[in-house]
Image: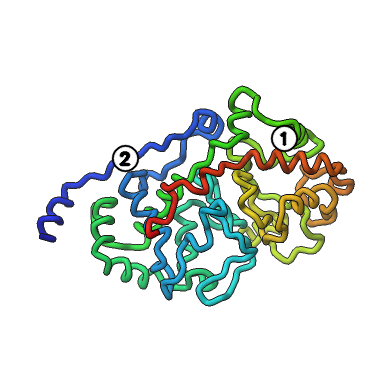
Amino acid sequence: MEDDQDDALDSYKPMPVTLDVPTFATDYLGDMPIPEDNPMTVEGIFLGRKLFYDTRLSNDSTKSCASCHLQSAGFTDPEQFSEGITGERGNRNAMQIINAAWFTSFFWDGRAASLEDQALGPVVNPVELNTTWPKVEEKISNDRLYSILFKMAFGTSEVDSMKIVKAISQFERTLLSFDSKYDSFFYGDFTGLNESEMNGFDIYFSEKGDCIHCHAGPNLTDNEFRNNGLDSELTDLGLADVTGLVEDEGKFKVPTLRNIEYTAPYMHDGRFATLEDVVEHYNSGVHADSPNLDPEMHNASEGLNLTEAEKTDLINFLKTFSEPEFLTNSSFSNPYE
């Protein structure tokens, strides 16, 4: 029976997928970048979703990618620092992977250039999944269902780390969020915001709030690295850990604000528990003497000087970036539940 099945799979061709991305997004961001050696297919996405949620990717089979990237939290971790299988924790908050197909680098310090590169790291990181790729490959290879799924997705039942991360990356590229109240307003007919949200819109897009310099476009990030004045003395060098350049010290990747209402805590080290904390940082807490402070923060010493009402309005506008359905979309959910 298995021989007949194998013969049938030998001629199987995976089905190409083109994701439904709104025109307003592709007009600004361009078509979704897809690596030539990892085209999107129905079978690859299905396999990647199973692997993303499979705890066998960890040394003791207790944690998966989804343990630190929870759908209910916008595929981030509500903990300040994620807990690995040994109980140890890292020193940075788990980053979002919403609309990550258009990210030009990954991790807060940009040390990975692609989703595929990014997916290689957590498996072997001692404070994350703390295992080795040969061990993972062996566990996955011993599952007959996976042998079939790899054959369908990649034309061979042979399991290796590159096929695993390619499948996971295909799934992660499907995590799209372009259907928020903000999208209906800004890319629609400029109606639908209440008075407070409209006031917040005006603050966000003006020099008063100064948000738009870094959080622009459909992805609400410029993909740059910036120091936003969190500390006068740096305890984490950020981008400089990768480049070795003094002028990069204290710079971190600008995150997307998509679904920011659900992705607390905030900043690279998760120091802010609420959006109120975040807004107050920019309002009155920026350290103007922070090394390599971003030049866009030209009013750092004075702060934004927002009133309480204006801060509330800005937060209400930030919440228009929310897409509640994203948190419950069954296409993204745990296939083992």
Q: Secondary structure at mark 2?
A: loop
Q: Nearer the viewer, mark 1 or mark 2?
A: 1
Cα–Cα gap, marks 1 and 2: 40 Å
- Residue 190's place in the image compared with 199, above or below, is above
Among all residues in the image, which is located at the extreme right? 302
Q: Residue at x 41, y 50 (%)?
A: 171
Indicate the secondary structure of the residue bearing disc 1.
helix
Foreground: 72 or 244? Answer: 72
Please name the amino acid that badge 2 sits on. Answer: Pro
Q: Which label is found at residue 318?
A: none
Q: Which residue is mark 2?
A: 16
Judged left or right of residue 102, residue 239 is right
Image quadrant assignment for residue 304: top right
- The amino acid at mark 1 is Glu
**Viewed as shown, does residue 152 lie left or right of 66?**
left
**Residue 17 image offset from top left, x and y in percent:** 35, 39
Sooner in the amino-acid sequence: mark 1 or mark 2 = 2
Q: How many marks?
A: 2
Q: Which residue is mark 1?
A: 197
